[in-house]
Amino acid sequence: MELDPFILSRIQFAANISFHILFPSISIGLCWLLVFFRLRFTLTGNKDWEYAYFFWVKVFALTFALGVVSGITMSFQFGTNWPGFMERVGNIAGPLLGYEVLTAFFLEASFLGIMLYGKNLVSNRVHLVSSFLVAIGTTTSAFWILSLNSWMHTPAGFTIENGVFMVDDWMEIIFNPSFKYRFIHTVTASLLTSAFFVAGISAWRARKNVDGPATWKVLRTGVVLAAIVAPIQIFVGDLHGLVALENQPAKIAAVEGIWETEKGAPLTLFGFPDEEARTTHFAIEVPKLASIILTHHVDGELKGLNEFEDAHPPVAPLFWSFRVMVGMGFLMLAVAWWGSYALFRNKVGPWLLRALSWMTFAGWVASLAGWYVTEIGRQPWVVQGYIRASEVVADHAGGMVLSTLIGYLLLYAFLLVFYILTLMHMSSKPARSLKESIDFAAPKANTPKPIATLGAV
Amino acid sequence: MDYWLPLIFVSLMGLSLLLYIILDGYDLGIGILLPLASDDEKDRMIETIGPFWDANETWIVLGIGILLIAFPSAHGMILTHLYIPVTLMLFGLILRGVAFDFRVKVTAEYKSLWNKLFFVGSLLAAMSQGWMLGSYVMGLESGLTSIAFSIAIALSLPAFYVVLGCGWLFIKSSGEIYTKAAKWARTAILPMGVGLFLISIATPIASSTIAAKWFTLPAAIGLLPIPLMTGVAYFTALWVLSKEEILKAGYGWIVFVCMVVMCLMMALGLAYSIFPDIVIGKLDIWESASSTASLEFALIGTVIAVPMILFYTAFIYKIFYGKSQPLSYE
């Protein structure tokens, strides 16, 4: 079998980006939760919030580290595997990535040091501000990278000279048509992912009776946040879909499994899309509903896949990913509302706690599925309508790419196993501070006290 | 501006990479020394770099980022050619970066595994960087000379990082580790010196372009301070390390300063050798530069952000100033 470096490079990039996104999808939201815990402690003086902070800041540090190292890999991949991309669109992509490094990476990496280890060296206020700056950093990072990502879906504000993209208007590039929706959809996704993450782990801790009232406060925060954010996310996702319809009709046609252009298109709830036969087998359809949802007209016209022959994304992965994302979204909505209701009535049973801990990583499933819809939905293009992915790939030997791909997959599998094992191990222990009678309420600046060693954190 | 912008960006890129070599250099050096320390000392040593390493590592992201922003075609050419060492470096940086957290958070039985991976990651990253540097100086050629040269740097750079790491331990630690750091530095500084000396001699022999730049009058006279200063810094470090009483009096930091001076001089020498090319003999900085509009936009951000970064970096070094305290989240 001939090893195709193009396919292998794609799989490698997909593996890298899939692994990477797991961690920011938790850490962006989790960092804002940490700011919230810190703020609650500062305002109320209630030590539970301080314990909550201490436990979750450790989880954050681990998650953040995994995000950082897998993110660095991404920035090198452009050069090692896709050199043509930067040669063609470097004028646009370069500065956007540069702004991410300059305004976000240094900020978060620098203040993380204070956030993690500076509690005794700075005042409570500086520590709070440091946590806040790290949260700003993670969100700013998302801003720039999603601006570039959105531009690849809905390119704007440029002219082309000799095949090279030249800048025409930076505001049009940064705030390209899909950016606003993608940014909100992604940050909201992270809030939802981290809400279920903290609620799930706290539910597990609550069942094992670890850390008492602090655990319940975090559980409540996570569940209520999820209950608020889940419906917003579904609404924003819908708006995002409308923008995609306008700019990337082939993506929507694949998501909905629409083969022929038609007016009053039905919504396919379920079925088996078949690209060879160009039909969806055993489709369960609701008449006219796709047109109503997407065009807000009973007889609105939707373009079918056959209009984009040779330039539409693979249908089945999109069709299924979309259904996984939406299904997961509604499941999260249901559990979050059930949980909020139970917490409000003060009647939390073991089944709710079980359901929450099963759904600890529900956000990962939905986020990955969502990103597959977005990214696979752009294929075969790397910049929608202008550059195909196959045009920019590096001309490496297939065997070499295969060996690095295997290396990455093994490494990522190893890290993921350890990440989850470590989370479980940490969750089964009380936040160390809970056992000690240190008076956290009066943090003393610049007076190091006999404290725990690194070995114990 | 067409003339100046690529110059500004190539200087910024050089500066970022130089800062990376120095700052993450001491982190990686300490990582390489880890197996020589007892379990308790391992914790102490990592405490000296814990609050800094993440920001230190960001300088390579900025350096490579500037290469990408300002010289996209060179970015593609260099990284495509360095595919294997870049991948190995990334594996190394990944392992080292996550080991900081895993080694203290996993169950006790796995702690020693993550200590080992901390070491493996640090060494792998340092050697790969040496390989990349060697390959780059040889103009990305794949001949035998180029390979031999890359191997020589791949072996010398870790030794340099180790001495730099010891210098950092002199600044941040005391007691037993301080004494051990002196022992380690004495062992590493000799092969490091021999390695760097051989590389300096080999460079003009291996590359006629570089030879032509150095051995013509009057340039040769003007350039003399570079090897001289490098030599002075090296022998000062060697002398300080050999004098137990100076080290005991707490002057170990001089070794760190000497290493920084050496690094600075070698960077200047390298910059002179390469300039104005970005890929030696293949591509110069103006040929590979992005459009002026893009560089102007990037420059605005750089002019605002870099001073801020330097400012808060200084702020953080001030907070964690002095001998390191046991790290704790409390």
Image (tube, rainbow, N blue to C red):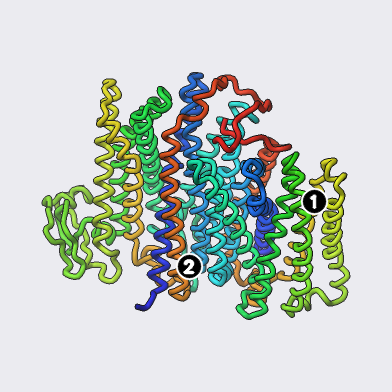
Q: Do the residues indicated by labels 1 and 2 lie within the same chain of the protein?
A: no
Residue placed at 26% from the left, 26% from the top? Answer: A349
Q: Nearer the viewer, residue B70 or B25?
A: B25
Classify residue B84 as left or right of residue B28: left
| Disc sitting over residue B255 in the figure | 1
Classify residue A28 as left or right of residue A299: right
Residue A223 quadrant? top left
User: Residue A199 at what x, y percent from top left?
Assistant: 36, 33
Quadrant position of the N terminus of chain A in the picture:
bottom left
Classify residue A334 as left or right of residue B307: left
A209 relative to A192, above or below: above
| Disc sitting over residue A254 in the figure | none
B7 relative to B203, above or below: above
Q: Amino acid at mark 1?
A: Val
Circle 1 SS class: helix
User: Residue B198 at what x, y percent from top left?
Assistant: 77, 71
Residue placed at 83% from the left, 42% from the top? Answer: B248
User: Residue B324 at what x, y percent from top left?
Assistant: 69, 37
Classify residue B176 as left or right of residue A426: right
- The chain letter for the residue carrying disc 1 is B
Cα gap from disc 1 to disc 2, whole angstroms:
40 Å
Q: Nearer the viewer, residue B257 or A385?
A: B257
Dot 2 corresponds to which residue? A81
Residue A150 visible (yes or no): no
B196 relative to A328, above or below: below
